[in-house]
Image (tube, coloured by chain):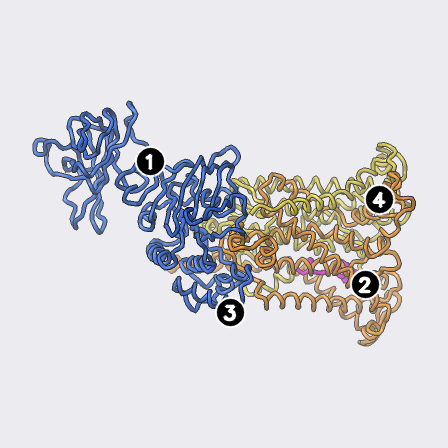
Amino acid sequence: MSPGRFTGLVTVAGMLFLWLPLLVVVLFSLHTTASLSFPFDGFSLRWYERISESPEVRAAARNSLVVATSTALVTLVLATLAAYGMSRSRSRWRAPLSLLFFLPITLPGLFIGIALLIAFSRLEYSLSLVTVTVAHLVYVFPFFFLLARAALERLDPALEEAAADLGATGWTIFRRVTLPQVWPVLVGAACLAFALSFDEFIITFFVVGPDPTLPLFIWSSLRRTIDPSINAISTLLLAFTVLLFVVTFALTSWGERRRRGTVDPLVLTGAQEPR
Amino acid sequence: MSAVAEPPAASPARAPAPRERGLRLGPVLLTLPAALTLLLFLIAPLAAFAVYSFLTGSLYEVSGPLTLENYREIAQSELNRKLARNSLIVGLLAAVSSVVIALPIAYWLRYTTSRAKTLVLFLIVASFLASYLVRIYAWRTILGAEGVINSGLGALGIVDEPLTFLVFNRFAVTLALVHIYLPYVILVIYAGLGPLQPAYLEAAQDLGAGWVQRWRRVVLPAVAAPVGSALLFVFVLSAADYVTPQFLGGTASVMIGVQVQVAFQGTGDYAGGAAISFALLAGFLVCYGLVALGLRLARLDRLRFAS
Amino acid sequence: MSGDPRVRIEGVSHRYGAVAALEDVSLDIADGEFVTLLGPSGCGKTTLLRIVAGFERPSAGRVLLAGEDVTGRPAHKRATNMVFQRPTLFPHLDVFANVAFGLQVAGVGKADQRARVREALELVRLEGYERRRSHELSGGQMQRIALARALVNRPKVLLLDEPLSALDLKIRLDMEVELRRVHRETGATFVYVTHDQREAMALSDRIAVMNAGRIEQIGAPTDVYRRPTSVFAAQFVGDANVLPVDVVEAGDEESTVQLGDTRHQVRCPRPQPGPAWLVLRPEAVEMRAGTPEETPGTLQGIVRDVAFRGTGFGCRIELPALGAQVKAEGRGATPPFDVDDEVGIDWRPESCWLLPRERGDDTPPPPVTSEPESDPAQARA
């Protein structure tokens, strides 16, 4: 049932709508003057030079890297274990656990941020990058869990049963049968977790301490002056996360191709069973 | 998701002890670290948050006996009602707009045979990764009086005065929110269309249905559940947003999330802020319940398509 | 206009990119006929059906329904209805709403809907199933509902795209009987697509044998079976032994052919002298036990395989002198031969048929394996 011209046009318009604003940010990051309006005076890299020299930008970027890496690694371990456990179990705890694991997606960041703020203040634990990492962990968990569980459920259970029949026990089965099949998806999900953490603002706003992450730094810069150096930071942030996505996509495609010989985008994102 | 076949129970011939089967016995135990983490860092804080709403707040502290005073204040507050109404409107507008725009795009993605499909999917998922803040900033610089649109129109000589209606109002807030959530909604509906093979649409067409009828009788019912969840998702997250209204909303369109943020970081009225938050949460839960009930009654919640 | 055929396909060609799916196909189907498009996967039969239905627009040619040119008309505006390979019942609707779908789209009143749905369900012998949901039905039941859903609209032309290929054998045989009955009772024109030649012969008034985008032969089942016009048709419709022979005497009623050392009579009027293919159906092969001396005038062979089939038996016989194999079938509870027995092969002059052969072409093409055709457009989705 070929889609008509109308849906095609809406799609083009939609893509323009999604990307033009972002491309405008990129465009003005290369502006020679400090103005953010037309007419366009010419291209220059001065804003990038300025932010690369700024110690605050470097510190914020470093903080974001540290937080994102920690978030990704911890989530990798916790969520993979959880997804593996859920997919191999028939326990009646599965339903409430599922609810728990998906809860952070359903809650507005406002609530998660404030709840954690209250918790930390109650425990008299001062806000720092650690509190930020904890918050990101909670936020990112459902995304990773979703992808990991989808990938694990797509595996043929007969392979693990065959291994068990040959005498392998749990950890060995996981290491030698399960992991070799799903590791591309797991790495991809870890990259996604990293990117989501790197970008996160709404929850971070409440639990950040004296060391800002990059989005927080952008926010505080906005309070001061609005100039293209913000565009430059934003462009770098955007480029970094998109690059990460391309790597993720390539990795998971390669993993799917190894397994099945073809790639279906829906299957990759875990949204659908392979046919 | 396919149900994973349980491994056969220990056969009489071999009868291994349960331990020998390793992970098989209590795989659900593997979820324990994650579950504990979430319980500790999500459920417990939320519980504390809930308790706060029943206490008395002042200057970043809470104290005193349990009371319903906060909730009573909310119910009587004119300001809160106005904010809530505004949030409701913005939330609904953002949700409905996202879905209406996403439906044709998801349809195109699902049924096109063009090679552009991979490119479009890439564009959608990549835009998904653009930071929230970068988007807000982008719209602010575009819609402002000295922003891209106005300066562009001015440079082209189309307008003499900058168009002020573009920003600092509900329109700008909704626009930015749609921009943020559109990729997610497209992907959810696209996934929902997965099981709806083209053969169903051909069958409908063969039975005399033109595109209007096909959408009304086959496509929309098939994606009713994903559309419902997408509507809820965008509504809840938009209504509770506190950054976008501050940045793009101006004074006339403050939303309730802002009130909460101000309570916690501004006035320090933790208890009051908590009460508003939980009143909001209760409202959201009611919405979730209504949508789920509606889908169940219409028997659209768990459709099984033949492969 | 009353003289027009119910369906006329005129010079239809269709390409998918560089691939030609149909080449200049023409066919007239009379009112009330049951015509089957028969062929292996990829022969274009499903494409042709979809063009008649209106799901594809042919690259060239016309389609006329009752004299009216509908080539440019989309499917929902044609007076045809289709039964698909898979039932595709709408899962969000119960059986009643599924069957009434076309009526509801057309704005038929509620009372009429109820009456006609009941009528359609009676036709497929599933009365009382109105409130059921598709996941409560078996495969065969779902296809019958799909049939009812198509027929309730009283189409003049019913198109069926391999509707039985997804069903189990026993159910398929029952459904064949049902289909014949429904065809008789409704008097509609049926255009049927299948790769199963047995099904085609059981159901049709006429069969159009298709290969590589063309119609090779059209005729009643007996004609196509007894008088195939090509080696392809001979091998695709029923089993066939195809042996290279030389026509040495061409007579008006009977001719003589040379096969190896022996000569045989063939009742085939006026063949061309020279090389030819001899088409011999397995059930026409006569086997005589004994050594060459005991069985003069027959082809010498050794039995290589014997299979019991309930209603009879099948044999594979190797003819060492010719380097060929022959399949034979016979009735009887016990096969009269064992593996490694020596036999002599013969046949009656009227039980075989001759087809043209190129000089030097000594090996018949291998029979085409047939599988349910997957429609390219569907496969892409």
Chain of the residue displaying label 4: B
Q: Which residue is identified by label 1?
A: C232
Foreground mark, 1 or 2, reads 1
Q: Which residue is identified by label 3?
A: C111
Badge 3 amino acid: Ala
- Range drawn in magenta: A102-122
Q: Which residue is identified by label 4?
A: B149
The residue lying toward the viewer, choosing from C50 and B184, is: C50
Q: Earlier in the sequence, mark 4 or mark 2?
A: 2
Q: Are marks 1 and 3 in contact (CB under 8 Å)?
A: no
Chain of the residue displaying label 1: C
Q: In the image, are marks 4 and 3 on the same chain? A: no
Tell me, by letter, which chain the rendering colours orange.
B
Q: In the image, are marks 1 and 3 on the same chain? A: yes
Residue at the limit of the structure toward the left, as seen here: C294
User: Hey, which quadrant is residue A252 in on the image?
Assistant: top right
- Of the chain colours in the picture, the one used for chain C is blue
